[in-house]
Amino acid sequence: MTSKVGSWSPWSRRACSARTDLRRTDPRVSSVSPCPCGLPASYQSCCARFHSGAVLAPTAELLMRARFTAFAVGDAGYLLKSWHPDTRPRNLTLDADQHWVRLEILGSLNGGLFEVEGSVEFRAHYREGGHSGSLQENSRFVRENGAWLYVGPLSPVVID
């Protein structure tokens, strides 16, 4: 079975089409650009350090922000690496025509520095062609061997 993840839905274990180039760099995001995750820092000093593997995201919320940014810059490798093995697809292809432009964190529960489970509710805004939309999800995260991992949605994903 093949699935194309562009709208983040469905987040299932279905295999996505194979791809050798796991990173599609968005030319609008450079190392000095503001980080797409919405924090007041450059991409290089914010989410790029997680994407490169230099450090691990210390909280579930920061992992959520790093995953959103990975969608924004086209880093499928990071998305796969930060996805729990029980729910992770074997391969992932991102939709090059879909641009993730803004992230709102609506709330979080647990997922802190000294916790092993948490959830983050967010709304991600995108543009595709002449259409703008959003996706809202309450995501479950777990920490294993010191690394936070995305497990999946806790409730149905809402696409607007």
Image: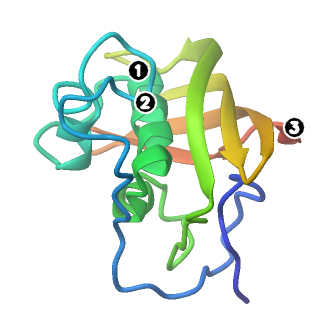
Q: Which residue is mark 2?
A: 36
Q: Is residue 29 left or right of residue 159?
A: left
Kind of residue at badge 1? Glu
The residue under label 1 is 115
Q: Residue furthest left?
A: 54
Label 3 SS: strand
Q: Amino acid at mark 2?
A: Pro
Residue occupying the point 42% across, 63% down: 76
Residue drawn 73% across the image and 54% down it: 129
Is residue 68 positioned above or below 52 on the image?
above
Q: Nearer the viewer, mark 3 or mark 1?
A: 3
Q: Residues within 10 Å of mark 3 (few under 14, many from 20)?
A: few
The C terminus: image quadrant = top right
Which structural element holds mark 2? loop
The mark nearer the N terminus, 2 or 1, is 2
Residue 136 appearing in the image:
yes
Residue 12: x and y in percent read: 71, 64
Q: Quarter-wise, where is residue 149 in the image?
A: top left
Against 129, is 117 above or below? above
Percent position of residue 17, x then y: 58, 86
Q: Give whichever of discs 2 and 3 has the lower sequence position.
A: 2
Distance between the alpha carbons at the discs numbered 2 and 3: 21 Å
Query: Residue, x 68% and y 32% (percent of image)?
Result: 125
Q: Which amino acid type corresponds to the residue marked 3 in the rendered image?
A: Val
For label 1, count other residues whose C-alpha is less than 10 Å away and answer few (under 14), some (14-19) or many (20+). Answer: few
Toward the viewer: 124 or 96?
A: 96
Q: Residue at x 69, y 76 (%)?
A: 14
- Rendering coords of residue 146 (x, y %): 26, 38
Where residue 71 appears, as percent x and y from the top left, is 49, 49
Left of 22 or right of it: where is 91? right
Q: Nearer the viewer, residue 115 or 92?
A: 92
